[in-house]
Amino acid sequence: MSAVLIQGGTVVNADREFRADVLCVDGQIAAVGEGLQAPPGATIVDAGGQYVMPGGIDPHTHMQLPFMGTVTQDDFFTGTAAGLAGGTTTIIDFVIPNPQQPLMEAYKTWRGWAEKAASDYSFHVAITWWDESVRRDMGTLVQEEGVNSFKHFMAYKNAIMCDDETLVNSFRRALELGAMPTVHAENGELVFLLQQEMKSKGITGPEGHPLSRPPAVEGEAAQRAIAIADVLNVPIYVVHVSCTESAEAIALARSRGQRVYGEVLAGHLVVDDSVYRDPDFDIAAAHVMSPPFRAKRHQESLWRGLQAGHLHTTATDHCTFCAAQKAMGKADFTKIPNGTGGVEERLMVLWDSGVNAGRLTPSEFVSVTSANAAKLFNIYPRKGCVAVGADADLVVWDPTATKTLSVKTQHSKGDYNIFEGREVKGIPTHTISQGKVVFAHGELRAEMGAGRYLKRPAFGPNFHALGRKAALAEPTPVAR
């Protein structure tokens, strides 16, 4: 028997906080209460003056991703290890088939890559094309492999972009299967057009990236995806919402009773578009990701979306490329590999800019960093709460300790940190994964291959069948 007793802390769940010890036995939480006794040989963690919270769930990462002619720096071991150092104990990554590639073939490739993961992991699977085999493979993935979410890129024309026909077919199939459609909302046709216009004007540096992807481009795609989901009566999850236009589209749809869920990245909450005008190409290019960082005014909309409950989860889109890879686009910003890091820093940034700034309570912090993602992707209460029977994935959090975020101290293999020099107050002192202490006072003890693949069951019929239209009374037939 392996046991860890966390003593003297304040447990924080999404619904409340309370003083309690937490006993973990053989990978699960065995008891939560005051005055718990440690079994013989148990590891004792002193959490006096600290919070004990569910380990973070990052629902949007890209480890070992082949993209734009290269592969990300972090693989499933280094990326999940970095997550553990920041208190994140579960990731949901993305299987992205090439156009015409069978879904199951791509899925098996990603499963093989992920065997080295240090933390638990799961997958969304992207729909990049459509025929009867895709429809069939979606069924296999949901019913046999525990995949309950499918990703749709509305951007990246001539690569992995979905047209509306594919969106409609895939959304309808997701509805049949009890799976959640998710979308990367950017109008790929407009992006492609604007990219060519920027280059025709001689704008070839990183400053052209946000100019070719203005907020309206994201807002239009979000509205279109939401409208398609509304007609088909299927819930929808919009990833990396970065601007007021998308946030307002989600809020409006929700006010009408539609099931729309929004995700926001830690980076979009605190980094603004001035980074693209840095005279140092390496710094500007390091921030190239899609959607791009926005003008500061959009940040307040995103924070208010989290506060109001219109935005539900926080993620990172962790996708690390080094300076040499980013230099592939030195003469053409459209060739800069898109992606930044953040899996290690997310919780610290959210606590410092959210809880310390009075925007979030500790319980709301737990909601947007773990509990909501666990609920939306159907792994709650196994993940996302501190309760008897849940997985012993926990973070012990010192709200008074400080740290300066930097590439010099990060565990990610990326060679730039988008939060470079930011001092945060509130950091993890311990991370417990599967009932083992894997990070303690700066010492990372991640084990390659210790992570488990999480099957996520399909959603029950009420989640999908009781959408806005189905909840209304059936129309009375007109007598003939």
Image (tube, rainbow, N blue to C red):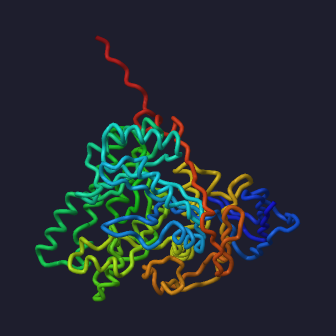
x, y percent for residue 214: 25, 67
Visible residue check, residue 412: yes
Spot the residue most to the left: 200
Visible residue check, residue 255: no
Q: Classify 183 as above or below 443.
A: above
Give the quarter of the figure containing the C terminus: top left
Q: Classify 172 as above or below 408.
A: above
Q: Is residue 388 left or right of residue 138?
A: right
Give the quarter of the figure containing the N terminus: bottom right
Spot the residue most to the top: 480
Q: In the picture, residue 32 is in which quadrant?
A: bottom right
x, y percent for residue 257: 42, 44
- Could you say which is closer to the camera, residue 186 or residue 470? 186
The residue lying at 68 percent from left, 74 percent from top is: 430
Q: Classify 342 as above or below 28.
A: below
Q: In the picture, residue 19 is in which quadrant?
A: bottom right
